[in-house]
Amino acid sequence: MSQNSPSDALGLQSATDLLAMLASREVSSVELLEHFVERNATLDDQINAIVTLDLDRATELARASDQRRAENQPSEILEGLPMTIKDAIAVEGVRSTGGAVELADHVPTEDAEVVSKIKDVGGIIFGKTNLPRWSGDIQAFNEIFGVTNNPWNLQCGPGGSSGGASAAVASGLTPWEVGTDIGGSVRLPAHFAGVCGHKPSYGIVPQLGYVDHVSYGLTDADINVFGPLAKTVDDLELLFDVVSGARRDMQSGWHLNLPSSRGLPRDLRVASWLDDPDCPVSEAVSTVLEAAVDAVETDGVGVNRSARPGIAFSDVRTVGQPLISAATSPGRTEDELAALQEIVNDPSADEWLRMRAASSTMSHRDWLLLTETRDRNRRLWSNFFDDFDVLLAPVAFVAAFEHQHEGTLYTRSLTVDGQTRPYSDLIVWTSQFGYVYLPSTVVPVGWTEDGLPVGIQVVGPYLGDRTTLEFARYLERLLGGYQVPPIADI
């Protein structure tokens, strides 16, 4: 594949570079907002990533920011930078639907806490990006806004659930984004659309205001996190620093002070887990990942390719994914729950479907017992990271795949390397690390022969976010990182 050099277009610059341009008055906030709006108007029919705009308020805020600069008033960290945010995150005064018809006309009266954090340091939210219903799929489509396409191949999806976010970032429609991730919803879209994404350690970014069911907003979902998507790792870390920290109701008692990276990239102890018989990686993706690790070793960094935690890979299916199903169950309708209970009670039903149905309808006692097993596995992961600093792993067993809207997460299938695979296997490699609360940074490391991007997960110990970001930054420098999709080079 011919990799493009980044264009001179404003929308294709990193957020960090745009902030520098704003600070030097090389561009105004109003001009930057207008540029993003024009790019969206040009590409919207093909991509359909930004589904709601709030231009009147955004323009007013941009003008006010430009005026403050003209008067040499002190600037905030994100002063005047326009951006979008996933439609699963509440924004005061802006339609926020969660992709569900029940909230098609819903306009929140207050911001999610991450939105407040962004606004408090000068960021300007000008739109919302597409997603599946209740963030529950690896594609980005719903009955309200339709389908979002992958800028690398319009016949494919950009991943999910933060698919509108990844497509918008990759296409230069927004400088960066905040998505949500419970089964891979930041990491999978980053991989499929060729951008960077960071899934923080659980509990360090407030998630109040997460629109994942009708009566949302007052509790934190288990496993779920809010995390940034961007063109560069530097951008990821800057936005991560803005949105992380204590919830408002906890700020009187604690503040977040993450440890620094465990060392420079060349000094880190690196392991890789690039394939597993339980969820084999396609030849197309495996070729790219193996080449990436080869490049790391050629550059003088040792990689242990055989080290593994003391946990069965299949625990992700019997512990991790059931916990994820339980965490997403508030989004189920009463009819859906009744149908799931029928599956549980039907001994002739597919064993895998029965297990997933049981996960969404489990008792509190069963959830507590699964949580005990999860805590045991967290301890085993901690032991693993006593000996290693980062683990390199696939994001998904395939690159971007063609749109598939019939059926559900549990009934669809994909044909890969001549074999039929369950569609739900798409979240196995991401769930493996998410349900045990570990941080993971995704960075593009190459392209398949068909020209589709491939990302890699850099996983680290709990609260080791600085370490995963640091090694991802090294991979970005070594292997090239984000490239501009041809459709977006305008």
Image: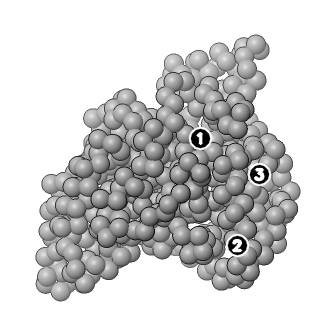
User: SS class of the residue under badge 1?
Assistant: helix
Q: How many residues crowd around disc 2 within 10 Å: few (fewer than 14), some, or many (20 or more)?
A: some
The residue wearing badge 2 is: 296
Q: How many residues crowd around disc 3 within 10 Å: few (fewer than 14), some, or many (20 or more)?
A: some
Q: Position of residue 227 (x, y in %)?
A: 50, 59
- Identify the residue at image location x=49%, y=28%: 405
The residues tagged by marks 3 and 2 sit, at their Cα atoms, a distance apart of: 17 Å
- Identify the residue at image location x=70%, y=78%: 299
The residue wearing badge 1 is: 327
Report if residue 53 is visible in the image.
yes
- Pair 3/2: label in front: 2
The residue wearing badge 3 is: 275
Q: Position of residue 305 (x, y in %)?
A: 82, 64
User: SS class of the residue under badge 2?
Assistant: helix
Amino acid found under the numbered disc labelled 2: Val
Q: Quadrant of residue 202?
A: bottom right
Name the foreground residue: 418 vs 225.
Answer: 418
Q: Please indicate whether residue 85 sits to the left or right of residue 361 in the image.
A: left
The residues tagged by marks 1 and 2 sit, at their Cα atoms, a distance apart of: 37 Å
Q: Quadrant of the C terminus?
A: bottom left
- Identify the residue at image location x=55%, y=40%: 401
